[in-house]
Amino acid sequence: MTVESVHAGPVRRQQAVDIRTATVRAVYMIWRRDLVRFWRDRTRVVGALVQPLLFLVILGTGLSSALRGAGGAGGGFRAGLDYTTFIYPGIIGMAVLFSSIFSGMSIIWDREFGFLKEVLVAPIDRSAVAVGKTLGGATQACLQGLVLLVLAPFVGVKLTPLAVLALIGLIFCLSFALAGVGVAIAARMRSMMGFQFVLNFLVQPAFFLSGALFPIVGLPAWMTALTRVDPLSYGVDPIRRVVLGASGVSPAELDKLSMSLGGQVVPIGLEVAILLAFGLALMAVAVINFRRQD
Amino acid sequence: MTQDPGQVAPVVEARGLVKTYGKIEAVRGIDLSVRPGEVFGFLGPNGAGKSTTISILCTLVRPTGGQALVAGIDVTRDPGAVRGRIGLVFQDPSLDDQLTARENLEFHAFLYDVPRSERRARIDGVLEMVELTERARSQVRTFSGGMKRRLEIARGILHYPQVLFLDEPTLGLDPQTRNRIWAYLHELRRREGITLFMTTHYMDEAEFCDRIAIIDHGQIIALGTPDELKAMVGGDVITVATRQVAAAAEEIRRGFELEPAIDRDTVRVEVPDGAGFVPRLMRELTVPVSAVTLSRPSLDDVFLKLTGKAIRDEGAGEMDQMRMMMSRWSRAGGRR
């Protein structure tokens, strides 16, 4: 084989791939791939809505009736506050939570079916996987949450245009934080079985402790502490304030139901900051883990 | 053995490559040098260290010792630069089956920075080469194993790599599909002048390579062209069928100074270069001959001679242990 025959092929690019721009492009491609798959797998999108809707419609209706029967005096549920409206923000949180965790699971899936290798051997920084997957997961979770937003009028939740805008922003922040959790966990995980464990020991407690189904005020101290370390709480709470505010609950009433730290009601801005910081921190953990592996 | 001529810089070079996993020595000092445009085969039983070596060359595994250069770049010093210059076809498929063939290629073109102006034409070109143009818009999950492998080969060369590494590219495919894959690979070399570095444990496939390294227990035990390796066995076997066996044997003994063996109505003789010997034999023989057969030693014979065991019936125990160890190691989260 002589040198001439080597160059007989088509014009070959000689310059090296620039790792930094390639990494940015890779983030975009990984994100886009997630969305293409999300769109293509519409049964999953619909399927992922079934559970939240069951909670919303059946649990909401059932407990609304039960609480009315108990005289309407129980807890914070005064006249005019419908339980379905109360748990509606919690159910959005639930849909976002499950969707985010599922996208974390898709990393393990990709690892098992080999596609992850295609990305890991590319001339890019592996942080692209962590960032792309977190953003992809966040976008999917966000879309899932927005579908529930569209359903608000059908379950009797009244929203104003301004509230809808605020909710979109809040849902995105929550999606980002939770997608970070999913990706950070999946970065080191090799098997689906391990993920089941995570689902049972992290996801379900996170859901129950988030205040999705009951107000997280006036609880025993140990449980209050747990609710305050649950990132989902910082998403459900501001969403609830916006939803209840739009349906005419007075600010004073609202403060009684809201998340407080050290006797002070936590402002929505701080909650948003906590969510974003949490998402960024976990994405950083995922970046470190992806960079480290063989 | 063939030595590198020295004028052309090798595109893949390894010196004293070692990789150990705990107490297991997967690769025990490998030296090799592959010239540009060559089809280089890495042949050996499962667990011999083929995949580990190829993984080191592709920057996926860090060697414990030794040095490896690909396209002149040290694989441990600048893995990113090496990755941009090589293409990979893995032992296990690594396509996204929910994406279409074209989408898989677009993803790759984007990752490897194929310029926008060339992207479309290049994707069309590689699809055409592996005859998947018609199926470009189908999701990969509808593809057969052979089609997936073809698509992976197309993807592997999409970014104009200097070397395409293929780890058991035809594993698990039926013979017909395997032959087609080989036809594509040779076409690829012809068109793109690319270097192919592949592992295989199919002896018949190794014959398609320009040079072969036979590896066993983490070491190269022979390296050369298929013909050179087969010459190690002692040469070709010529069988002459004739009614006058004694006379034919005598003529061969006197004319060529060889020791023919008589077996019923045939005369057998072993010569180093059978193809060259037959015409001369035909000129010299005066007795009537009804048939001449030339059988060449296979690479199976070479492996048998070098290791004292056939490549296919190697003891499974030791290898399986190794695989288990390796998978345990990777589960534990092997770090670089």
Image: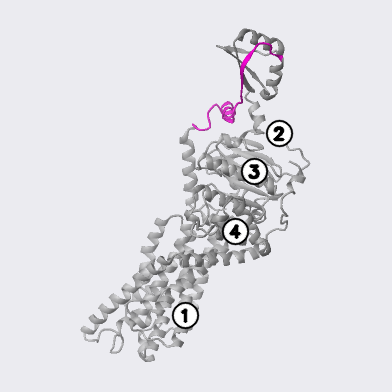
Residue that carries the numbered disc 2 in the rendered image:
B2
CA gap, disc 4 and disc 2: 37 Å
Q: Which mark is residue B108?
A: 4
CA gap, disc 2 and disc 1: 68 Å
Residue that carries the numbered disc 3 in the rendered image:
B186
Span colored in magenta:
B284-313
| Amino acid residing under circle 3 | His
Tell me the SS state at disc 1.
Answer: helix
Q: Is residue A89 left or right of residue B202?
A: left
Tell me the SS state at disc 3.
Answer: helix
In which chain is the residue bearing label 1?
Answer: A
Residue drawn at x 60%, y 52% is B154
| Amino acid residing under circle 1 | Ile
| Amino acid residing under circle 2 | Thr
Q: Is residue B177 left or right of residue A67?
A: right
Q: Earlier in the sequence, mark 3 or mark 2?
A: 2
